[in-house]
Image: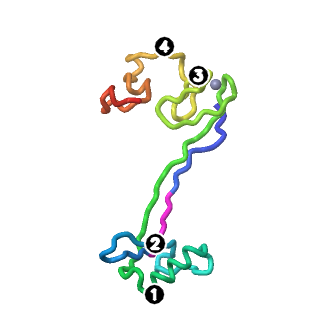
Amino acid sequence: MRILKRRTHHHHVEHRLSFERVGAGGGYSFLCNEAGHLDEANLPPAARDNYRACLAGLALVRSVVESVHDYTEHAVGACEVCGREVVLYGFTNACDCGADYNASGQLLAPRECWGEETGESLADILGVDAARPVDSLE
Ligand SMILES: [Zn+2]
């Protein structure tokens, strides 16, 4: 399979200046840098109004909250049989034409050749979580 897009891992850290409304519940948060500074001029008008209201005392508890986001974008390859794009997200990745690929994009033997002698469990073959009860699968 020709790989069209490699698997990429992303690590994104974001900081928000957070204001909580004491006793009233809820609050506001605004993207900022690690030190809690933000570029007020680049805020949309409604956000700028809210930010200024927070600074004026609408919300009193102020903190910088860090959020870390880690995620993976799966690789995509071109099917050797039909040319369609196949997302390589799991142990077995099926193309709409019926061809199957492993997570590295290698074409697998036809399904009628699959079995326990190859070390695959039924869950592996079906691409399901074996720990989940069958009736919860949709
Ligand atoms: Zn295909």
- Position of 129 compared to 50: left or right? left
Question: Magenta residues, as a range?
Answer: 11-17
Q: CA distance from mark 4 to mark 2?
A: 56 Å
For label 2, the SS is: strand
Question: Above or below — where is 54 with respect to 14?
Answer: below
Q: Which residue is disc 1 drawn over?
A: 56
Q: Residue at x 60, y 75 (%)?
A: 45
Q: Earlier in the sequence, mark 4 or mark 3?
A: 3
Name the residue rendered at 58%, 41% in the picture.
75
Q: Position of residue 56 (x, y in %)?
A: 45, 87
Please state which amino acid type lies under the numbered disc 4: Cys
**Camera-side residue of 39 and 60:** 60
The disc label shown at residue 29, or none: 2
Name the image quarter holding residue 105: top right
Three-letter amino acid code at disc 1? Answer: Ala
Q: Quadrant of the C terminus?
A: top left
